[in-house]
Image (cartoon, grey):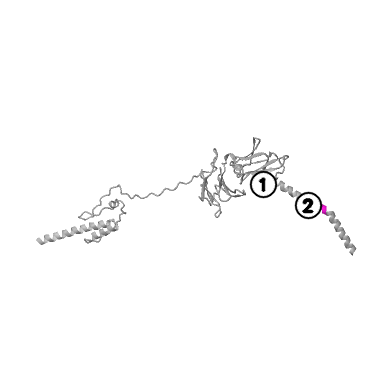
Amino acid sequence: MRTALRASLAAAVVAGALLAPAAGAAYAATAAQAATVAQEAPADRFSGTPVYIGEGLVAVLRHEAEGPEAWIRAVGPDWKPGDNYMYRVLTVLDRMNPVDSANGLRLEITRMNSAAPLLTVTKEGVATSFPMPLSEAGRTHGAECVSATKRLGLHGTLVADLTTTPDGPQVQLVDGVTKEPYRKLTRTAPALAKGDRTVARIVNPSAARPSFSYETPGQADPFGTALFPELPAGCTFTYAVQDEAPAPKPEATPATGPSAAPSAPSAPATGSTAPSAQPSATAASAVPGAPKAQTVGQTAVVPEGGVAAGAEIAAEDGDDSTTVYAGAGLGAIVAGLGAAFIARRRARSRH
């Protein structure tokens, strides 16, 4: 039994020794294949259009939401189109760093704010320009009908890139350091969602010259406003322009001055023998600053003395209503009737 066990162990050792090189070779092949795949299929954030610019350098050109970029990588003098380009990065050109140099070459992104920027490479005074990819708006509408880009700083590292296209104004919010896109505002979606930590919106998005309103915490003025760049000459919007509605006109204020129309004389009451002492309501309202006249029916006879008292109280209270004048008129009528009655009694007593 011990002999059989020893024979089995010896066979296992021999098999392991024979299989180990094959297993190691398979693992090495798998690792090499994975590395090759990783180089040939780089992440989208670092991929782009590779262009050989000389001196063993390739410029990987990009133009996405973060703006134009040129990643300068060392690939060697024998690099040709189609070869892998994901090698050591020497420098990166972008909005924050548009000019640099590498291996004796001066590198600059020109026409930075246009929809079709260029990478200009200068060697010994001779400049060569390489077209960079068009922006998203440029790919949609053509570079000739997309305005220049205006960049504004909001809060922290957040920036806003303002552009005008035939479809209207656009705002791309992006982190200026990490270059990660945050939000995008358009004519049909001009404001951020309610509760967003950033305050930013397009004002009058369908107007000929819309504006961008945003919050700048920590600044002397916490709010800022900027106009969008103009659409290039010869280009038109794809929608009907609707300018800002004019402010509503203020309501007309009623005239309080004296009336220019003369007041008509009031007709005497039927059966009355004495002229009416009551002035017309129009005449009362013609007094500057006088309140509107009130029509009050007066049927009770006001005793003599009461009229004066009533008039005095009314004057103290500032009441210019026709009640005072009506009382005065009735008082005069009563006085006239009393005098006629006394004269008639004297005439009878004489007879």
Secondary structure beneath label 1: helix
Q: Nearer the viewer, residue 111 or 304?
A: 111
Q: Residues within 10 Å of mark 2 (few under 14, many from 20)?
A: few
Q: Give the quarter of the figure containing the N terminus.
A: bottom right
Between discs 1 and 2, the one toward the N terminus = 2
Q: Secondary structure at mark 2?
A: helix
Placement of 338 over or under 36, stated as above or below = below
Which residue ends up furthest to the left in the rendered image? 351
Question: Is 184 or 77 nearer to us in this picture?
Answer: 77
Residue type, mark 1 in image: Phe
Q: Residues within 10 Å of mark 1 (few under 14, many from 20)?
A: few
- Describe residue 29's horizontal placement relative to residue 301 as left or right: right
On the image, the x and y values in percent for residue 342 come to: 15, 60
Label of residue 27 in the image? 2
Residues rendered magenta in the picture: 20-24
Q: Which residue is denoted by mark 1 in the rendering?
A: 46
Q: Which amino acid is tagged 2?
A: Tyr
Q: Quadrant of the C terminus?
A: bottom left
Q: Residue at x 16, y 59 (%)?
A: 339
Depth check: give the residue in front, 36 or 288. 36
Specify whether residue 105 is in view. Answer: yes
Q: Is residue 351 visible?
A: no
Cα distance between the residues tagged 1 and 2: 28 Å
Q: Looking at the picture, tell me which residue is in the foreground, 30 or 278.
A: 30
Callout count: 2
Residue 242, horizontal then vertical, whole percent: 50, 45
Disc 1 and disc 2 in contact, CB within 8 angstroms: no
Quarter of the image where one finds residue 110:
top right
* Chief SS of the magenta region: helix
Instruction: Judge whether residue 109 is colored magenta.
Output: no
